[in-house]
Image (cartoon, rainbow, N blue to C red):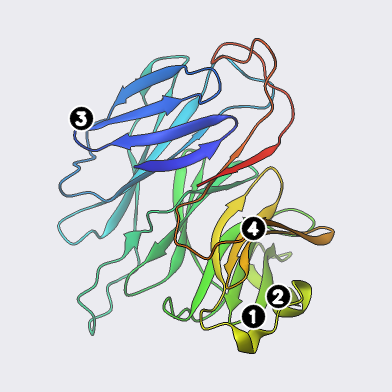
Amino acid sequence: MILGCRHGLVLIFLWTRNQLLVWDPVTGDQHFLDIPPGFDKEETVINGAVLRAAGEARHFQVVLVGNSGMQLTRAVASVYSSETGVWGDLTSTLLPAKDPTSDVPIRILVVCSVMVGSSVYWLLTGNWFGILEFNVDRQSLSVIDVPVDVDAGRCSFTVMQAEGGGLGFLFLSGYCIQLWKRKTDCDGVASWVLGRTVALDKLLSMNSEEGSQSPRILWFAEDNNAVLVRTFIGVFMVQFEPLQFKKLFESYCWFHFYPFEGVYTADARIGGGHGGAKLLCDA
C-alpha cells in the first residue's frame, strides 16, 4: 500500500512483511525498514510520510503514525532517520472523545499526508472529522478541528498550503470550493478564516446539470500547490495562485492517483543530488 510520495521518494507499507519500503522510482534505490514497536499492524491503523530537507539527497526521514489503544483512542508517532539508522521515541496524543451515539472509532484516513512548513498533516475520520498534526521540529502530535461540518458522502476535502502560506483547508461541496486558512491572533488563539470560494463548474466551463457524479478531490500536490479533482468530464489539476487549471485525463474511471514530484540530475540517487519540482501524475 502506497502511503505517500514526497521529495522524489515513495513510501510503501508492505503489510505481509510488516515493513516499510522507501523507494526512488527513478534510480530504483530501495530501503526496507522494519515497523517499530508500538505499531501492531493487526490493531493499529498505520499511515506515514517520507521527507528530506531541501538540498539533502543522501538522507531522509520517515514519520510513522497510527491509532493505538483498544478503542483506538490515541494517535502515536515515531520518526526514522536514515542518518542514524534508528527509530526515535514514541510520542502520542489523545484523540477526541468518542461520540456515545456512534460505534465508529476515529481513525487516521488512509490517504497521503500533506506537509506545510515543518508539520505533516493527516485527515482523521470516523464519528468525528479532524486533522492530525505532527511537528517534525518539536516531535509532537496535536489534533485540529476542521472549519466546516463534514458529510463524507456528499463532499470531499483536503489539507493544503493556504494562500500566502500557512495551514489551509480545501472543502469541496457540489461544485463550490471553499479555501480556508488557519490564523493565530495576538493572544495565540488559532482559528479558521474563510479566504475565498471558487465555482468549479464556471472555472472548468462545465454544465453541472449534465453530470450525475459530483466532483471529488483526489489528491494535493505540495510542491506545485495544486489539487487534483475528478469530474464527469475528466481529471483536472487546479492551482489557486494564480487561479488556473490543466486537464490531465478524459476518463472518469476510479483510479488511485499519486502525484510524484521531483527533478533529478544524473547523480540523483538516494545519496545523489536533486533539483526543483515537477509534477508527474501517475495512476
Residue under numbered circle 2: 200
- Answer yes or no: is residue 262 visible: yes
Q: Earlier in the sequence, mark 1 or mark 4?
A: 1
Q: Is residue 239 above or below residue 276?
A: below
Mark 1 Cα shell of 10 Å, populated few (<14), some (14-19), many (≥20):
some
Is 220 situated left or right of 106 in this image?
Answer: right
Please give the residue where the numbered disc 3 appears in the rendered image.
Answer: 17
- Most foreground residue, 205 or 142: 205
First in sequence: mark 1 vs mark 2: 1
Outermost residue, right direction? 242
At numbered mark 2, what does the secondary structure look like: helix, strand or loop?
A: helix
Question: Is label 2 in contact with label 4 (beta carbons under 8 Å)?
Answer: no
Can residue 137 be seen by looking at this rendering? Answer: no
Image location (x, y in percent) of residue 17: 20, 30
Q: In this rendering, would 197 be left or right of 105?
A: right
- Precedes in sequence: disc 3 or disc 2: 3
Which amino acid, mark 2?
Answer: Leu
Label drawn at residue 227? 4
Q: State how far apart marks 3 and 1 are (Cα).
A: 42 Å
Q: Which numbered disc flags the more N-terminal residue, 3 or 1?
A: 3
Q: Are marks 3 and 4 in contact (CB under 8 Å)?
A: no
Name the residue at the front extreme. Answer: 250
Q: Nearer the viewer, residue 282 or 243?
A: 282
The x, y position of residue 274, in whole percent, is: 68, 21
Alpha carbons under labels 1 and 2: distance apart: 5 Å
Q: Residue at x 50, y 47 (%)?
A: 283
For residue 175, the mark is: 1
